[in-house]
Image (cartoon, grey):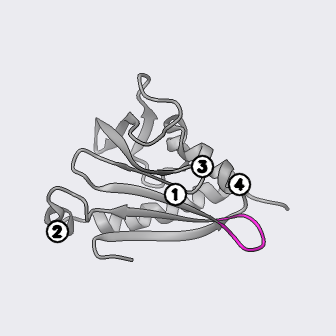
Amino acid sequence: MGKRQVSATRTVAAAPEQIFELLADPAKHPLIDGSGSVLAARSAGTRRLELGSRFGMDMKMGASYRILNTVVEFEENRLIAWRHFNGHRWRWRLEPAEGGGTTVTETFDWSTARIPLLIDLSPFPKRNKAAIVQSLDRLSELFPGPR
């Protein structure tokens, strides 16, 4: 993992295509958000994301706010990443797992931020690492696999 990135990986009992469909639909992001800050997709946003898509989200971190994201990395069923106004990225990488399921890696990458030093000095890397683990927990709960 590069400097100015935090991530976690989990194997989820679903095909990459199933997980990607969830990630490519901004309206479903609150289902997996482990931070508790993603409230809802803005109604005027794109339903199915692709490279270059712009989508707004209603957020809450203390106070409520809105944020606009742009999809900056995209490989169907394998990779999707969006950036915020400051340039930092949220990236999801999906790889078929040996024996079935998908190895999912979520990354918060602030190496691309306009002023990465501000994020270095903030609590966001540590807080986002914990939220990533919780997001992967939630994703695993949505696709529990065979019982």
Tell me the residue that label 1 is attached to: 135
Tell me the residue that label 3 is attached to: 20
Marks 1/2: CA–CA distance: 24 Å
**Callout 2 secondary element:** loop
Instruction: Place residue 90 in its image quadrant.
Output: bottom left
Instruction: Place residue 31 in its image quadrant.
Output: top right
Q: Nearer the viewer, residue 69 or 137?
A: 69
Up/down of 110 relative to 26, above or below? below
Point out residue 99 in the picture as x, y percentages from the top left corner. 78, 72
Residue type for callout 3:
Phe
Tell me the residue that label 4 is attached to: 143
Residue type for callout 4:
Phe
Q: Nearer the viewer, residue 147 or 110?
A: 110
Marks 3/4: CA–CA distance: 12 Å
- Please say if the residues under marks 1 and 3 sit with CB atoms less than 8 Å apart: no
**Callout 1 secondary element:** helix
- Please say if the residues under marks 4 and 2 sit with CB atoms less than 8 Å apart: no
Residue type for callout 1:
Ser
